[in-house]
């Protein structure tokens, strides 16, 4: 059952919100959204490329020491420095940076979550959360002989490929496959398609097209039929508003010190958060 409990913004009114990557598209959107939704909250940011909108601080250390809560929508290359700073000065934290695929991400986030609430958010849209949840449950039922493909499409400026959302979607499907006692491993691959195609491979296809914010398609195909779940974002505002919603939810006094997934916000459940243990999941990059 989807939990759509209204969230009060009163608990965030006196907070200082720190945004890593404030000069990016998502960061600037968050600045504007916070000014509208949380007008009494103070917003500061850190970015190696400072812009002319918003109040910037000089270092990650200063950001963490000054903020009540931190959102990271920067670049994957900054993550090691971000997590070191976070553990040294724990504050509630939302990780929304795409392309963070370090093997020990979950380990670091769980370490931080011993002290504060932490959320791992590959995609902040409700539609993406529901797509991932449905894909997992489909994978627990649909015959494992079906070919599985994930097609992700983003604007031409997106650097990482495949997207973090697509990888989280593949992880959810892999976890569902594992509940069918599927022999061998679920292997994720991207780049050129393999021929002949081995059973148990999740093929990933990435496209960078014009100014399309993002679209993710999960497909199961047999010789007789095809099932597809598609999530399309028409405006970046959907991602921004979703992130603000997660921020407010995470700062609730009810929130325990632990690592949350976006599914937790909506009362949905997957066996484990994305990019963690659960299912046999390896990658095979062929580009």
Image (tube, rainbow, N blue to C red):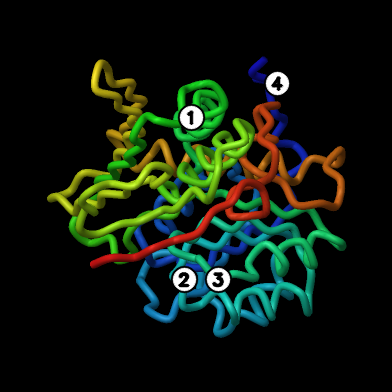
Mark 4 surroundings: few (<14), some (14-19) or many (≥20) residues within 10 A = few
Picture disc at residue 135:
1
Q: Considering only vertical position in the picture, is 263 above or below 94? A: above
Question: Label 4 belongs to which residue?
Answer: 5
Distance from disc 4 to disc 1, alpha carbons, whole Å, reads: 24 Å
Give the mark, 4 or 1, whose residue is nearer the N terminus.
Answer: 4
Indicate which label's residue lies in the foreground, 2 or 4: 2
Q: Which mark is residue 76?
A: 2
Sequence-first tag of 2 and 1:
2
How far is the residue under mark 2 from the one under mark 1?
26 Å
- Cα–Cα span, label 4 and label 3: 34 Å
SS for tag 2? helix
**Left or right: 135 in relation to 195:** right
Residue 102 has which mark?
3
Q: CA distance from mark 2 to mark 4?
A: 32 Å
Mark 3 Cα shell of 10 Å, populated few (<14), some (14-19), many (≥20): few
- Chain-order first, disc 2 or disc 3: 2
Depth check: give the residue in front, 174 or 26. Answer: 174
- Residue drawn 72% across the image and 67% down it: 107
Q: Relative to residue 174, is residue 99 drawn left or right?
A: left
Q: Choose the circle earlier in sequence order: 1 or 3.
A: 3
Q: Upstream in the sequence, badge 4 or badge 3?
A: 4
- What is the secondary structure assignment of the residue under circle 1? helix
Is 192 situated above or below 269? below
| In this view, 115 is above or below 224 | below
User: Would you say the residues marked 4 and 3 are in contact, meaning their CB atoms lie under 8 Å apart?
Assistant: no
Quadrant where the N terminus sits is top right
For marks 2 and 4, the one nearer the N-term is: 4
Residue found 44% across the figure and 70% down from its top:
75
């Amino acid at each position: 059952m989807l939990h759509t409990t209204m969230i009060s913004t009163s608990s965030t009114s006196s907070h200082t919100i720190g945004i890593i990557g404030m000069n990016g598209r998502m960061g600037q959107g968050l600045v504007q959204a916070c000014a509208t939704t949380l007008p009494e909250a103070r917003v500061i940011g850190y970015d190696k490329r400072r812009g002319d909108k918003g109040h910037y601080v000089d270092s990650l250390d200063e950001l963490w020491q000054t903020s009540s809560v931190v959102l990271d929508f920067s670049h994957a290359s900054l993550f090691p420095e971000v997590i070191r700073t976070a553990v040294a000065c724990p504050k509630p934290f939302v990780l929304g940076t795409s392309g963070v695929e370090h093997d020990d991400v979950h380990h670091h986030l769980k370490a931080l979550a011993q002290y504060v609430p932490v959320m791992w958010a590959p995609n902040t849209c409700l539609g993406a959360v529901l797509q991932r949840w449905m894909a997992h449950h489909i994978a627990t039922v649909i015959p494992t002989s079906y070919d599985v493909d994930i097609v992700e499409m983003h604007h031409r400026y997106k650097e990482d490929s495949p997207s973090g959302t697509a990888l989280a979607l593949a992880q959810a499907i892999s976890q569902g496959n594992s509940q069918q006692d599927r022999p061998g491993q679920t292997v994720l691959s991207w780049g050129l398609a393999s021929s002949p195609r081995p059973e148990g491979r999740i093929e990933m296809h990435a496209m960078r097209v014009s100014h399309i914010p993002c679209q993710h398609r999960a497909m199961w195909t047999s010789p007789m039929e095809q099932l597809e779940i598609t999530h399309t974002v028409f405006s970046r505002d959907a991602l921004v508003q979703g992130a603000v919603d997660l921020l407010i939810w995470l700062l609730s006094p009810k929130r325990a010190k632990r690592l949350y997934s976006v599914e937790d916000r909506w009362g949905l459940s997957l066996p484990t958060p994305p990019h963690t243990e659960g299912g046999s999941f390896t990658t095979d990059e062929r580009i």
